[in-house]
Image: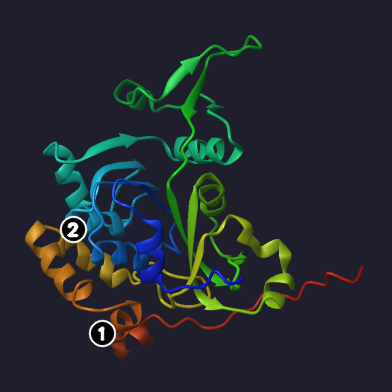
Amino acid sequence: MTKLMSLSDAIARYVNDGDTVYAAGFTHLIPFAAGHEIIRQGKKNLTLARATPDLIYDQMVAAGCARKVIFSYMGNPGVGSLRIVRSAIEKGELEWEEYSHFGMITRLQAGAAGLPFLPMNQTGATDLERVNPNIKRIPDPYGGKDVIVVPALNPDVAIVHVQRADANGNAHLWGIIGEQKEAAFAAKKVIVTAEEIVDESVIRSDPNRTMIPGIVVSAVCHVPFACHPSYAQGYYDRDNEFYLAWDKISESLEGVRAWLDEWVFGVKDRAEYWQKLGSETHERLKVEARYSERVNYGRY
């Protein structure tokens, strides 16, 4: 039984107004294509959860998709602030919860384990404790110093981009590994987008690279170049020029909406978006192949 479907169908079927949506990926493999499809379909009142929100949440907030953001660190990586999200928070137009990086990952780990909360060591981020009532201190039952506890996070939908997957959603990813596995196991539904759809034998050939098993996946979608302007290790590079340009685009809500009109509403899907970027950008983002050594799994 295949779980393959178009990204449009997956978003229509599994993302509902009012859902908590977790877009996974750290530095690379950020699911921009899925975020754009959510915008295109006009989903509303979403709670957008993500460690290190990237430009995708600036775009989704500008499009009116969100009522709340849950995050750890918020910014245009290496450039500056997420202007749209920050402005909406400061104006009281957007609810928010902030955690440390480890706090967000611990919330997902608790959700993945089916626990109501998990403890953490105390951090230097005492200001977060003052502004976020979900971050609490409890006594160490074994007599040590107090520990921080954070509640489980169980998103309605997790969206994970991977390098390759089979038709049942078993997925390989490599490079910088973020919170993809934790988000997938914590979520009620999982949408996987993949650079390549491969035969099951390819996935079985390297089981240690199967970070997302098909048993937790609701839909798998073939979406090449899905994480531009972030990157997919081994497929294309990070578009640093775009991140710099976004700082100027996002100086006004009008500027962002004009960009959305052209690059999200003005194209029907990711393939058309990629073609619109043009051959010069394609060439600039090409990466040279660098293969790992073969692994001998033997026979048994």
Name the amino acid type tagged 2.
Ala
Q: Which residue is mark 2?
A: 63
Give left or right: position of 251 versus 282: left
* Residue 227 percent location from the top left of the image: 39, 69
Total numbered circles? 2
Please, what secondary structure does the residue beneath circle 1 have? helix
Name the amino acid type tagged 1.
Lys
Q: Is residue 212 visible?
A: no
N-terminal of the pair, mark 2 or mark 1, is: 2
Give left or right: position of 139 versus 159: right
* Residue 272 percent location from the top left of the image: 30, 83
Q: Which labelled disc corresponds to residue 276? A: 1
Task: Please identify, in this view, whether the residue under mark 2 or under mark 1 is nearer the observer.
Answer: 2
Please, what secondary structure does the residue beneath circle 2 have? loop
Q: Is residue 191 visible?
A: yes
Give left or right: position of 284 versus 232: left
Q: How is the image coloured?
A: rainbow
Q: Are marks 2 and 1 in contact (CB under 8 Å)?
A: no
